[in-house]
Amino acid sequence: MTPWRRFLRFNLVGALGIGVQLTGLWVLVEVGRAPYLVATAAAVSAAIVHNFLWHVWWTWRDRPAPGRAVAVRFGRFVLANGLVSFAGNLGVMTLLVGGLGLSALPANLIAIATCGLANFWLGDAVVFLAPKNTKTAKFLPECSS
């Protein structure tokens, strides 16, 4: 798959993840009256799991992991992409909402955008590594795109 095609898929999955994250944030803050940082952490967690599953199934489907290696990959995803997402989102939210008084949803969109490029690079270079052996590259059936 070309890097541009993968980047497009990454961003489409990310757009869906933004929907998951913003919906979770809105429900927790506006409906549940949860503190914005607690709500942000929960919403980011939901988006991390959502995005990982879609990236495995679609974005990096040409780089499958056998058996328990998926769990290892999820651990790398949480440590790499999750750490960037948590630190970036909580840091930017603290600055924009807590420091500047911006409302939570627009502030969260800014936070998400600041983390995107770093997360694509981490996904490609750290989490979803290309298989070293081409015989291990056919664990999933082909996907029509």
Image (tube, helix red, strand yellow):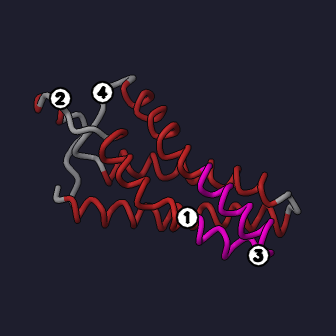
Secondary structure, mark 4, is loop
The CA distance from mark 1 to mark 4 is 31 Å
Give yes or no for contact between labels 2 and 1 (Cβ–Cβ under 8 Å).
no
Residue on which the image places disc 1: 112
User: Disc 2 or disc 1, which is closer to the eye?
Assistant: 1
Q: What residue type is disc 3 on?
A: Ser
Q: Do the residues labelled 2 and 3 touch (CB within 8 Å)?
A: no
Q: Which of marks 4 and 3 is in front?
A: 3
Q: Foreground mark, 1 or 4? A: 1
Which of pointers 3 and 1 lies earlier in the amino acid sequence? 3
Three-letter code, disc 4: Pro
Q: Residue at x 17, y 55 (%)?
A: 1
Residue 66 marker: 4
Q: Does the magenta stretch include residue 68?
A: no
* Quarter of the rendering occupied by the C terminus: bottom left
Q: Do the residues labelled 4 and 2 touch (CB within 8 Å)?
A: yes
Is 90 one of the magenta-colored residues?
Answer: yes
Tell me the element at label 3: loop
What residue sits 62% from the left and 53% below the top?
Answer: 44
Q: Position of residue 36 (x, y in %)?
A: 79, 60
Q: Give the range drawn in magenta.
A: 86-111
Cα separation between marks 4 and 2: 8 Å
In the picture of the structure, the residue carrying the numbered disc 3 is 103
Extreme left residue here?
A: 134
Q: Which mark is residue 136?
A: 2
Task: Categorize mark 4 by other alpha carbons within 10 Å: few (<14), some (14-19), many (20+).
Answer: few
Labels 4 & 3 near each other (Cβ < 8 A): no
- Amino acid carrying label 1: it is Ile
